[in-house]
Image: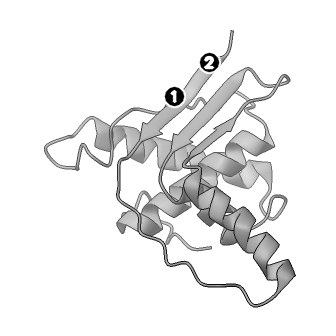
Amino acid sequence: MKHLLYSLLFVALVVFNCNTPKTASKNISNEKLENLKNNDTVKISSDKVEYDIIIIEPGYNYWLASTARPEGYYSQQFMESRNYQYVIEWNNRVLQPNRFSPNLYELQIDYQPNIDYGYEVNYKLYNYFIYFQLKYNQRLGSFIPRI
């Protein structure tokens, strides 16, 4: 049975500016990116790993494809280390709704450092934390979120 690593739901109105592409190849890649804008749900699951990650966030899928570092840029060990630190701070904020916006920090994340979630889950989670910090001007640790 698959376990749900976490589920995030943020409702936001996103307005996108559409420009007419100048070449056919740009048109194809722009169409793919435009489809990503419209698909606000990212789900990662694997037969090897019994965990799912579901991210429902307007704009995240587009940002991941267009702005985030490519897969393989960071090591799994690096992302696991950062993810664990980010999860601890995230969960602390979920438990303090009077201090931190419950609209931003809705659900706790069940992330165990002794479980190997695999590269893809760690990659998507790590990049979500970067995206979240940049988009909402938050700081989940001592590291400055950057791409």
**Residue at the (48%, 72%) spot, across then down:** 16
**Residue 63 to residue 50: above or below:** below
Task: Give the left or right position of residue 128, taking residue 79 as reference.
Answer: left
Crowdedness near tag 1: few (<14), some (14–19) or many (≥20) residues, C-alpha within 10 Å: some
| Quarter of the image where the N terminus is located | top right
- Give the residue type that dot 1 points to: Asp
Q: Which mark is residue 144?
A: none
Residue denoted by label 1 = 110
The answer to whether residue 114 is seen in the rendering is: no
Counting every numbered tag in the picture gives: 2
Q: Nearer the viewer, mark 2 or mark 1?
A: 2
Residue 10 placement (x, y as % from top left): 38, 46
Place residue 45 in its image quadrant. Answer: top right
Q: Is residue 48 left or right of residue 115?
A: right
Q: First in sequence: mark 2 or mark 1?
A: 2
Q: Please name the residue that numbered disc 2 is placed on.
A: 3
- State the image coordinates of residue 81 (x, y, percent, origin top left): 64, 49
- Amino acid under disc 2: His
Establish if 121 lies above or below 2.
below
